[in-house]
Image (cartoon, rainbow, N blue to C red):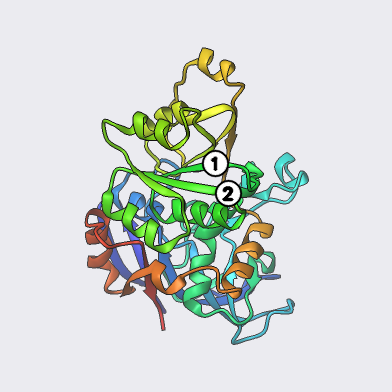
Amino acid sequence: MDALLCSTPGTLEVVQRPAAARAAGEVLVRPRRVGICGTDYHIYEGKHPFLAYPRVMGHELAVEVVDGGESDFRAGEIVVVNPYLSCGSCIACRKGKPNCCTKIAVLGVHRDGGMTGLLSLPPQNLVRAEGLSADACACVEFLAIGAHAVRRAALDSSDRVLVIGAGPIGFGAVLFATLSGARVTVLDRDAERLAVAADLFDIAGTILADDAVDAQVGSVTDGEGFDVVFDATGNQGSIEKGFDFVAHGGRYVLVSVVKGDISFADSDFHRKEMTILGSRNATAVDFERVIAAIGAGQVPVDRLITHRTTLTGAVTDLPRWASQKSGLIKAVIEID
């Protein structure tokens, strides 16, 4: 029997069920670290629009191979999980974009995820990360989302970049934008998070989202706006306001997603000849980019993970962290 953390809206419970078996052609793995994501908090709170309850959460995964089956993965290896299970045949997959597969199944969202004892997964969704700790492996997925967004934006060293949202996903965008050589500013409504961003990353500065935000943006860009703006807030009002911060000829990358419509002034959009880019999930290239950056010592993993718990402890810790964010960057569940 396996213990697993099961969620229904507003409820978490550790339950027992028969242990997973290795499916034909797949690899049996044991989760060792599970990062807790904003998606997990939304699932617990009953705010996620794309899944059926009850659900076993967990998609930021460091796993140990138990049975590699016919693959070249061997028992005992610690590997990263790419949680985006794709069909391989739809129009997106044929174009090399399995991250937006028309039939995508994300672990912990569309199907049960890693807050459990054993999982059977396709070998193509396991990524080797030689030399990386279990902690580091658990950070790869959320950082890959930022890396993918930065790759979508095609940054260069001349770009002035604004990242809106100083949470884990925003931090991924900040990190890889700075590594691209761009000049990065971070905007958030939380002064504590801005201070953390300034301490962790080599950024140009921070902007507090208050009544003077337009003046602050104008001041740091000589009234021109930013060449590239990333929104990583998941807030409709923030996304709509972000259009104002994009320079003429600039790009606006929507990393976060909201349920519902986003409105903007078409005349302003055309006047600026603005480009809007959606950025969804990540691809194998992005996972490899993150793994290489961690291996090169460019990612402060030890400082990104601020909170820890166990599968049993998460029953009380996850609901508390959903509302008490002070000092929290990334929480992980340790499964041993």
Disc 1 crowd rating (10 Å Cα; few below 14, some 14-19, many 20+) is many
Q: Is residue 145 left or right of residue 223?
A: right
Nearer to the camera, 97 or 129: 129
Disc 2 crowd rating (10 Å Cα; few below 14, some 14-19, many 20+) is many
**Residue tagged by mark 2?**
182
Amino acid type, label 1 = Arg
Quarter the C terminus occupies: bottom left
**SS category of the residue bearing label 2:** loop
- Please indicate, yes or no, whether residue 101 appears anywhere in the rendered image: no
Q: Residue at x 28, y 48 (%)?
A: 190
x then y, percent, for residue 286: 64, 58
- Tell whether label 1 touches label 2 (CB within 8 Å): yes
x then y, percent, for residue 258: 42, 36
Nearer to the camera, 56 or 98: 98
**SS category of the residue bearing label 1:** strand
Q: Is residue 155 above or below residue 137?
A: above
Quarter the N terminus occupies: bottom left
Q: In the orientation shown, which residue stands out farthest toward the bottom?
A: 76
Q: Is residue 197 left or right of residue 266?
A: left
Gap in angstroms between the C-alphas marked 2 and 1: 6 Å
Q: Is residue 91 left or right of residue 192?
A: right
x then y, percent, for residue 181: 60, 53
The image quarter in which residue 11 lies = bottom left
Q: Earlier in the sequence, mark 2 or mark 1?
A: 1
Nearer to the camera, 226 or 138: 226
**Residue tagged by mark 1?**
160
x then y, percent, for residue 151: 64, 49
Amino acid type, label 2 = Ala
Nearer to the camera, 83 or 8: 83
- Please indicate, yes or no, whether residue 115 appears anywhere in the rendered image: yes
